[in-house]
Image (cartoon, rainbow, N blue to C red):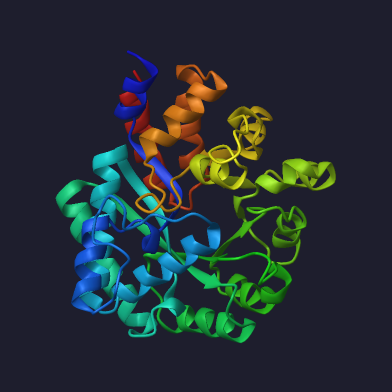
Protein backbone atom coordinates (compact mmCIF):
# COMPACT_ATOMS: atom_id res chain seq x y z
CA UNK A 1 0.00 0.00 0.00
CA UNK A 2 1.09 3.62 -0.36
CA UNK A 3 2.41 5.60 2.60
CA UNK A 4 -0.78 7.67 2.66
CA UNK A 5 -2.93 4.52 2.67
CA UNK A 6 -0.84 3.10 5.51
CA UNK A 7 -1.18 6.30 7.51
CA UNK A 8 -4.96 6.36 7.09
CA UNK A 9 -5.15 2.73 8.18
CA UNK A 10 -3.05 3.02 11.35
CA UNK A 11 -4.93 3.43 14.66
CA UNK A 12 -3.31 6.44 16.30
CA UNK A 13 -2.46 7.73 19.74
CA UNK A 14 -1.95 11.43 20.36
CA UNK A 15 -0.56 13.04 23.46
CA UNK A 16 -0.86 16.76 22.68
CA UNK A 17 -4.34 18.02 21.90
CA UNK A 18 -6.41 20.66 23.69
CA UNK A 19 -10.13 20.31 24.22
CA UNK A 20 -10.65 24.00 23.59
CA UNK A 21 -8.70 23.84 20.32
CA UNK A 22 -10.38 20.75 18.96
CA UNK A 23 -14.09 21.62 19.06
CA UNK A 24 -15.44 21.34 15.49
CA UNK A 25 -16.38 24.69 13.96
CA UNK A 26 -20.15 23.95 13.66
CA UNK A 27 -20.26 22.96 17.34
CA UNK A 28 -18.42 26.12 18.38
CA UNK A 29 -20.75 28.33 16.31
CA UNK A 30 -23.84 26.70 17.79
CA UNK A 31 -22.62 26.89 21.38
CA UNK A 32 -21.45 30.49 20.97
CA UNK A 33 -24.88 31.51 19.63
CA UNK A 34 -26.52 29.89 22.63
CA UNK A 35 -24.52 32.13 24.97
CA UNK A 36 -24.75 35.34 22.96
CA UNK A 37 -21.06 35.33 22.04
CA UNK A 38 -20.43 37.60 19.07
CA UNK A 39 -18.20 35.95 16.47
CA UNK A 40 -16.44 37.67 13.58
CA UNK A 41 -18.22 35.24 11.25
CA UNK A 42 -20.53 32.25 11.45
CA UNK A 43 -18.99 30.66 8.37
CA UNK A 44 -17.52 27.36 9.61
CA UNK A 45 -14.79 27.62 6.97
CA UNK A 46 -13.50 30.89 8.46
CA UNK A 47 -14.69 31.17 12.05
CA UNK A 48 -11.28 29.92 13.23
CA UNK A 49 -9.18 32.19 11.00
CA UNK A 50 -6.25 33.90 12.78
CA UNK A 51 -3.02 35.57 11.69
CA UNK A 52 -0.79 35.53 14.78
CA UNK A 53 -0.27 33.45 17.89
CA UNK A 54 -1.89 36.10 20.09
CA UNK A 55 -4.92 36.25 17.75
CA UNK A 56 -5.10 32.49 18.06
CA UNK A 57 -5.13 32.79 21.87
CA UNK A 58 -7.93 35.38 21.79
CA UNK A 59 -10.01 33.03 19.64
CA UNK A 60 -9.16 30.15 21.95
CA UNK A 61 -10.67 32.07 24.88
CA UNK A 62 -13.88 32.55 22.92
CA UNK A 63 -14.13 28.78 22.65
CA UNK A 64 -13.62 28.59 26.43
CA UNK A 65 -16.51 31.01 26.89
CA UNK A 66 -18.71 28.91 24.59
CA UNK A 67 -18.03 25.82 26.72
CA UNK A 68 -19.95 27.42 29.58
CA UNK A 69 -22.08 24.63 31.06
CA UNK A 70 -21.55 20.94 31.83
CA UNK A 71 -23.75 20.06 28.84
CA UNK A 72 -21.61 22.26 26.56
CA UNK A 73 -18.43 20.65 27.83
CA UNK A 74 -19.76 17.12 27.44
CA UNK A 75 -20.80 17.93 23.87
CA UNK A 76 -17.45 19.56 23.10
CA UNK A 77 -15.50 16.54 24.32
CA UNK A 78 -17.69 14.07 22.46
CA UNK A 79 -17.57 16.01 19.18
CA UNK A 80 -13.82 16.53 19.52
CA UNK A 81 -13.12 12.82 19.92
CA UNK A 82 -15.52 11.81 17.14
CA UNK A 83 -13.85 14.35 14.84
CA UNK A 84 -10.44 12.90 15.72
CA UNK A 85 -11.60 9.39 14.89
CA UNK A 86 -13.19 10.45 11.60
CA UNK A 87 -10.27 12.53 10.34
CA UNK A 88 -7.25 10.66 11.69
CA UNK A 89 -8.32 7.22 12.94
CA UNK A 90 -7.76 8.34 16.52
CA UNK A 91 -7.79 5.44 18.96
CA UNK A 92 -6.52 6.96 22.22
CA UNK A 93 -5.86 10.57 23.28
CA UNK A 94 -4.41 12.26 26.32
CA UNK A 95 -6.24 15.58 26.11
CA UNK A 96 -5.42 18.89 27.77
CA UNK A 97 -8.16 20.98 29.32
CA UNK A 98 -7.90 24.37 31.03
CA UNK A 99 -10.18 24.44 34.08
CA UNK A 100 -9.26 27.98 35.17
CA UNK A 101 -10.41 29.34 31.80
CA UNK A 102 -13.96 28.12 32.51
CA UNK A 103 -15.14 30.25 35.41
CA UNK A 104 -18.80 29.32 34.88
CA UNK A 105 -18.28 25.76 36.17
CA UNK A 106 -16.33 24.24 39.05
CA UNK A 107 -13.39 21.94 38.52
CA UNK A 108 -15.45 18.94 39.62
CA UNK A 109 -18.33 19.83 37.31
CA UNK A 110 -15.97 20.20 34.38
CA UNK A 111 -14.28 16.85 34.98
CA UNK A 112 -17.57 15.03 35.42
CA UNK A 113 -18.88 16.51 32.16
CA UNK A 114 -15.70 15.60 30.28
CA UNK A 115 -15.78 12.04 31.58
CA UNK A 116 -19.38 11.69 30.39
CA UNK A 117 -18.36 12.83 26.92
CA UNK A 118 -15.39 10.46 26.90
CA UNK A 119 -17.49 7.47 27.92
CA UNK A 120 -20.07 8.21 25.24
CA UNK A 121 -17.41 8.57 22.52
CA UNK A 122 -15.79 5.32 23.54
CA UNK A 123 -19.12 3.49 23.55
CA UNK A 124 -20.20 4.91 20.19
CA UNK A 125 -16.91 5.08 18.30
CA UNK A 126 -14.25 3.07 20.16
CA UNK A 127 -11.99 6.06 20.86
CA UNK A 128 -10.72 6.40 24.42
CA UNK A 129 -9.27 9.35 26.27
CA UNK A 130 -7.57 10.48 29.45
CA UNK A 131 -7.14 14.05 30.67
CA UNK A 132 -4.34 16.47 31.57
CA UNK A 133 -5.34 19.60 33.48
CA UNK A 134 -3.48 22.65 32.18
CA UNK A 135 -2.17 25.61 34.12
CA UNK A 136 -2.62 28.91 32.27
CA UNK A 137 0.76 30.59 32.67
CA UNK A 138 -0.85 34.03 32.16
CA UNK A 139 -2.56 33.45 35.51
CA UNK A 140 -0.82 33.60 38.89
CA UNK A 141 1.20 30.87 40.62
CA UNK A 142 -1.44 30.92 43.36
CA UNK A 143 -4.16 30.03 40.84
CA UNK A 144 -1.96 27.17 39.66
CA UNK A 145 -1.60 25.79 43.18
CA UNK A 146 -5.36 26.08 43.68
CA UNK A 147 -5.89 24.06 40.50
CA UNK A 148 -3.67 21.26 41.80
CA UNK A 149 -5.48 21.37 45.14
CA UNK A 150 -8.77 20.93 43.26
CA UNK A 151 -7.31 17.95 41.40
CA UNK A 152 -6.32 16.37 44.71
CA UNK A 153 -9.69 17.11 46.32
CA UNK A 154 -11.65 15.68 43.36
CA UNK A 155 -9.66 12.70 42.09
CA UNK A 156 -10.69 10.94 38.89
CA UNK A 157 -9.12 7.95 37.18
CA UNK A 158 -9.58 9.90 33.94
CA UNK A 159 -7.40 12.84 35.04
CA UNK A 160 -3.84 11.56 34.92
CA UNK A 161 -1.61 14.60 34.55
CA UNK A 162 -0.81 18.28 34.97
CA UNK A 163 0.47 20.54 32.22
CA UNK A 164 1.14 24.22 31.57
CA UNK A 165 0.41 26.20 28.41
CA UNK A 166 -0.21 29.65 26.90
CA UNK A 167 2.42 32.35 26.29
CA UNK A 168 5.86 31.28 27.58
CA UNK A 169 7.12 34.85 27.73
CA UNK A 170 4.37 35.74 30.22
CA UNK A 171 4.86 32.82 32.57
CA UNK A 172 8.25 31.10 32.63
CA UNK A 173 8.23 27.63 34.21
CA UNK A 174 10.11 28.64 37.35
CA UNK A 175 7.04 30.61 38.47
CA UNK A 176 5.07 27.38 38.91
CA UNK A 177 7.43 25.18 40.92
CA UNK A 178 5.07 25.01 43.92
CA UNK A 179 2.15 23.72 41.84
CA UNK A 180 4.24 21.09 40.09
CA UNK A 181 5.93 19.99 43.32
CA UNK A 182 2.53 19.52 44.96
CA UNK A 183 1.32 17.52 41.96
CA UNK A 184 4.39 15.29 42.08
CA UNK A 185 3.87 14.56 45.77
CA UNK A 186 0.40 13.25 44.94
CA UNK A 187 1.47 11.04 42.03
CA UNK A 188 0.16 13.30 39.27
CA UNK A 189 2.13 13.01 36.04
CA UNK A 190 3.73 16.24 34.79
CA UNK A 191 4.40 17.80 31.42
CA UNK A 192 4.93 21.34 30.12
CA UNK A 193 4.68 23.39 26.95
CA UNK A 194 8.29 24.54 26.67
CA UNK A 195 10.54 25.75 23.89
CA UNK A 196 7.58 26.37 21.62
CA UNK A 197 8.36 29.95 20.65
CA UNK A 198 12.09 30.43 21.08
CA UNK A 199 13.00 30.00 24.76
CA UNK A 200 15.24 26.94 24.74
CA UNK A 201 16.11 27.25 28.43
CA UNK A 202 12.48 26.57 29.36
CA UNK A 203 12.94 22.96 28.27
CA UNK A 204 15.71 22.36 30.77
CA UNK A 205 13.95 24.33 33.52
CA UNK A 206 10.79 22.28 33.04
CA UNK A 207 12.76 19.07 33.44
CA UNK A 208 14.94 20.15 36.35
CA UNK A 209 12.61 22.36 38.40
CA UNK A 210 9.13 21.15 37.48
CA UNK A 211 10.01 17.44 37.35
CA UNK A 212 8.37 17.02 33.96
CA UNK A 213 8.23 13.54 32.46
CA UNK A 214 7.32 14.83 29.00
CA UNK A 215 7.85 18.06 27.08
CA UNK A 216 5.26 19.51 24.73
CA UNK A 217 6.86 21.12 21.65
CA UNK A 218 10.52 21.79 22.57
CA UNK A 219 11.55 22.99 19.10
CA UNK A 220 13.63 25.97 20.29
CA UNK A 221 16.16 23.69 21.96
CA UNK A 222 17.50 22.67 18.54
CA UNK A 223 19.10 26.12 18.39
CA UNK A 224 20.87 25.66 21.75
CA UNK A 225 23.36 22.75 21.64
CA UNK A 226 23.71 22.59 25.42
CA UNK A 227 19.98 22.34 26.10
CA UNK A 228 19.53 19.95 23.17
CA UNK A 229 22.23 17.62 24.54
CA UNK A 230 20.70 17.77 28.02
CA UNK A 231 17.24 16.88 26.72
CA UNK A 232 18.58 14.11 24.49
CA UNK A 233 20.50 12.56 27.38
CA UNK A 234 17.44 12.74 29.65
CA UNK A 235 15.49 10.45 27.31
CA UNK A 236 12.35 12.54 27.83
CA UNK A 237 9.52 12.14 25.33
CA UNK A 238 8.50 15.12 23.17
CA UNK A 239 4.98 15.63 21.88
CA UNK A 240 5.50 17.31 18.52
CA UNK A 241 2.97 19.16 16.39
CA UNK A 242 4.15 19.52 12.80
CA UNK A 243 1.78 22.18 11.49
CA UNK A 244 2.12 24.30 14.64
CA UNK A 245 5.92 24.15 14.39
CA UNK A 246 5.75 25.10 10.71
CA UNK A 247 3.49 28.05 11.58
CA UNK A 248 5.83 29.29 14.32
CA UNK A 249 8.98 28.94 12.23
CA UNK A 250 7.69 30.70 9.12
CA UNK A 251 7.12 27.83 6.72
CA UNK A 252 3.81 29.28 5.58
CA UNK A 253 4.59 32.99 5.82
CA UNK A 254 8.30 33.25 4.98
CA UNK A 255 8.92 30.20 2.83
CA UNK A 256 11.17 28.46 5.34
CA UNK A 257 12.07 24.91 4.31
CA UNK A 258 10.01 22.59 6.58
CA UNK A 259 12.88 20.09 6.55
CA UNK A 260 14.94 22.59 8.59
CA UNK A 261 12.43 23.25 11.39
CA UNK A 262 12.99 22.26 14.98
CA UNK A 263 10.66 19.28 14.92
CA UNK A 264 12.23 17.96 11.72
CA UNK A 265 15.64 18.14 13.40
CA UNK A 266 14.34 16.37 16.50
CA UNK A 267 12.94 13.50 14.43
CA UNK A 268 16.09 13.14 12.36
CA UNK A 269 18.20 13.12 15.54
CA UNK A 270 16.23 10.12 16.81
CA UNK A 271 14.73 11.76 19.89
CA UNK A 272 11.64 10.10 21.39
CA UNK A 273 9.02 12.10 19.48
CA UNK A 274 5.35 11.54 18.75
CA UNK A 275 3.04 13.44 16.43
CA UNK A 276 -0.10 15.24 17.57
CA UNK A 277 -2.47 17.90 16.30
CA UNK A 278 -2.42 20.42 19.21
CA UNK A 279 -5.53 22.41 18.16
CA UNK A 280 -6.74 20.55 15.10
CA UNK A 281 -10.00 22.33 14.31
CA UNK A 282 -8.52 25.78 14.83
CA UNK A 283 -5.29 25.34 12.85
CA UNK A 284 -6.70 23.24 10.97
CA UNK A 285 -5.00 19.87 10.73
CA UNK A 286 -5.61 16.22 11.59
CA UNK A 287 -3.51 13.22 12.51
CA UNK A 288 -3.41 11.82 8.99
CA UNK A 289 -2.18 15.17 7.67
CA UNK A 290 0.48 15.44 10.39
CA UNK A 291 1.89 12.00 9.57
CA UNK A 292 1.64 12.46 5.79
CA UNK A 293 3.41 15.83 5.81
CA UNK A 294 6.23 14.57 8.02
CA UNK A 295 6.64 11.46 5.90
CA UNK A 296 6.74 13.45 2.65
CA UNK A 297 9.11 16.12 3.97
CA UNK A 298 11.57 13.74 5.60
CA UNK A 299 11.21 10.88 3.11
CA UNK A 300 10.10 8.37 5.72
CA UNK A 301 9.46 4.76 4.75
CA UNK A 302 6.72 2.50 6.12
CA UNK A 303 8.81 1.30 9.05
CA UNK A 304 9.59 4.86 10.13
CA UNK A 305 5.93 5.89 9.93
CA UNK A 306 4.87 2.92 12.04
CA UNK A 307 7.73 3.80 14.41
CA UNK A 308 6.26 7.25 14.98
CA UNK A 309 2.88 5.70 15.77
CA UNK A 310 4.54 3.27 18.19
CA UNK A 311 6.46 6.12 19.85
CA UNK A 312 3.15 7.74 20.77
CA UNK A 313 2.08 4.58 22.57
CA UNK A 314 5.44 4.30 24.33
CA UNK A 315 5.33 7.95 25.40
CA UNK A 316 1.77 7.78 26.71
CA UNK A 317 0.78 7.54 30.36
CA UNK A 318 -1.65 4.70 29.68
CA UNK A 319 -1.42 1.64 31.90
CA UNK A 320 0.49 -1.42 30.71
CA UNK A 321 -2.65 -3.30 29.69
CA UNK A 322 -3.90 -0.41 27.55
CA UNK A 323 -0.48 -0.01 25.95
CA UNK A 324 -0.36 -3.72 25.11
CA UNK A 325 -3.78 -3.50 23.45
CA UNK A 326 -2.77 -0.40 21.46
CA UNK A 327 0.47 -2.03 20.30
CA UNK A 328 -1.40 -5.14 19.16
CA UNK A 329 -3.89 -3.04 17.21
CA UNK A 330 -1.06 -1.07 15.59
CA UNK A 331 0.83 -4.21 14.63
CA UNK A 332 -2.29 -5.74 13.09
CA UNK A 333 -2.98 -2.62 11.01
CA UNK A 334 0.64 -2.35 9.86
CA UNK A 335 0.77 -5.87 8.38
- Residue 81 in sight from this viewpoint: yes
* Residue ranking furthest to the top: 1
Q: Is residue 208 left or right of residue 302?
A: right
Quadrant containing the C terminus is top left
**Based on the displayed image, in which of its 4 quarters is residue 206 positioned?**
bottom right
Q: Is residue 144 above or below residue 122?
A: below
* Residue ranking furthest to the right: 226
Mark count: 0
**Based on the displayed image, in which of its 4 quarters is residue 328 positioned?**
top left
Q: Is residue 101 above or below residue 81?
A: below
Quadrant containing the N terminus is top left
Determine the residue positioned at 38% across, 39% down.
Answer: 287
Measured as percent of width and height from the top left, residue 100 is found at: 46, 79
Determine the residue positioned at 29% across, 74% down.
Answer: 38
Measured as percent of width and height from the top left, residue 261 is found at: 64, 36
Measured as percent of width and height from the top left, residue 301 is found at: 49, 16
Determine the residue positioned at 48% across, 41% down.
Answer: 312
Q: 320 or 314: nearer the eye?
A: 314
Q: Is residue 76 left or right of residue 310?
A: left
- Residue 118 in sight from this viewpoint: no
Measured as percent of width and height from the top left, residue 125 is found at: 19, 47
**Based on the displayed image, in which of its 4 quarters is residue 179 positioned?**
bottom right
Amino acid sequence: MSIDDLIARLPKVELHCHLEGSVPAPTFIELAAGHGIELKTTDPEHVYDFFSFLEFLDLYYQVCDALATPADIERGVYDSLVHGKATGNLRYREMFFSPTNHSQVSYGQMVDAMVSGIKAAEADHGVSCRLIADINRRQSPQVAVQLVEAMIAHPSEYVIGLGIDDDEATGPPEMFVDAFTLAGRHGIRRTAHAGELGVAANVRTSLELLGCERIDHGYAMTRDPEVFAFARDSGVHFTGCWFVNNFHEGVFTEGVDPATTGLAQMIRAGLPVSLSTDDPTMIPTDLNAEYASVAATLGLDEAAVVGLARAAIDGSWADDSTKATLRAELDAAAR
